[in-house]
Image: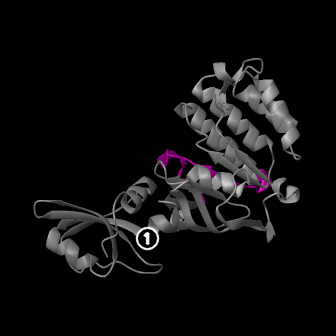
Amino acid sequence: MSLELKGIVKKYGKKTVLSGLDLTIEEGKIYGLVGRNGAGKTTMLSIASAQNPVTGGEVLLDGEKVWENQKALDQICFSREVGNMVNGVQNTMKVREYLRVAQMLFPHWDKEMAERLVDEFELDKKQRIFKLSKGMQSMVTIIIALASKAKYTFLDEPAAGLDVVARENFYRILLDEYSESGRTFVVSTHIIEEAAEVFEEVIFLDKGKILLKENTDDLLERCIHVSGKAEDVDAVSEGKKMYHPEKLGRSKGVTLLLEQGESFDKSGKDIDVSPVSLQDVFVALCGGEETV
C-alpha cells in the first residue's frame, strides 16, 4: 500500500504554492519533510489528508482517490498545530474536550494510549487550549497524532515550543510506536539535526516541488564538503553536482552530491574532504543554486 500525490497543483488566487508535485509515500517508514518557510509543506500535508482541495492533480491511497472517500480517510491523520484561535474565535475548548472530538474523528483511536501520554506529558485535561503554553499545545497535537492509530500519520512541526528534554521524549515515543505498529509517519520540522537519526527517508520540498526524496543514510554518504585552493577544488569537482560554493581569497569550499555508486578521487590535490550533516545538505541544496 502507498499514498501517491500525482501532479498536485495548488493555487491561492494568482499565487502558486504547489506546482506539479509528484510524491509516493510508502507504507512503514518515517519520513522527514524539510523545506524553507513558504515551501508548501503544510499545504502538501493538508492536501494529502484531503483537508484541502487541489487545483489540479489527485491523491490516491492504494489506487483509490482519497477525496471524499471515507474508507481511505480512515487510514490518514493530519494532526495540525493546535492554536489559540479557531476561525477568529478564541479556542476555549478544554484538553479533554479536544481529545473527545479527536476520538470521534478517528475510528482506530487508542484511548488508553491517549490517557498514558496525557500523564507522561503532565497535561491538565481541565485546562483550556488557549491557556496552554506553546509547548503544551504541541503535546496535544502529538497525542492526537499517535493515539489516532492511523496507518498514515502526518505531524506538522510537532516539536515547536518543546524544550530539549520534551523533544527527546517525543522522538523516543515516536520510534517506540513505529517499531510496534509499523505505521507510516511524515514529520515536518525545522529542527533538522536532532531528528535526522529518526528519519528513514528525507523529503526536501523547495518552491512547491519535490527537490529530493531519498534514504537519509544513503544521502549523507553521497554528500561531501570539499575545500582548499580554488583551482584544486575546481579540478576535483569538475563534472560533479556542486552546491553552495563559497570563496575566500584563493580558497574555495563546495558541497558535492555524488551519483549513486560514484567514488571521489582527490587526484593528489591538497584539499580537505569532510562529511556533512543533514542540515548542511539542506542548506546547500535549498539555500543555493546548483552550479553544474
Q: Is residue 19 above or below residue 117?
A: below
Q: Report the number of numbered marks.
A: 1
Quarter of the picture containing the C terminus is bottom left
Label 1: element kind: helix
- Does the magenta portion include 193? yes
Image quadrant in which you'd find residue 121: top right
**In front here: 98 or 250?**
98
Quarter of the picture containing the N terminus is bottom right
Q: Is residue 110 above or below residue 124?
A: below
Image quadrant in which you'd find residue 89: top right
Q: Is residue 245 visible to us here?
A: yes
Residue 102, how many percent across, how many down?
81, 37
Q: Which residue is mark 1?
A: 222
Q: Residue at x 61, y 45 (%)?
A: 156
Q: How is the image coloured?
A: one colour
Residue 250, how many percent across, how many down?
10, 64
Q: Is residue 282 above or below residue 42?
A: below
Q: Is residue 110 visible to us here?
A: no
Q: Which residues are magenta?
A: 180-200
Q: Residue at x 46, y 64 (%)?
A: 220
In the picture provided, is 202 more to the left or to the right than 63? Answer: left
Residue 231, how many percent across, how many down?
15, 74
Image quadrant in which you'd find residue 230: bottom left
Given the image, on which type of amino acid does mark 1 rest? Arg
The local crowd at label 1, few if under 14, some if 14 to 19, many if 20 or more residues have their Cα within 10 Å, is some
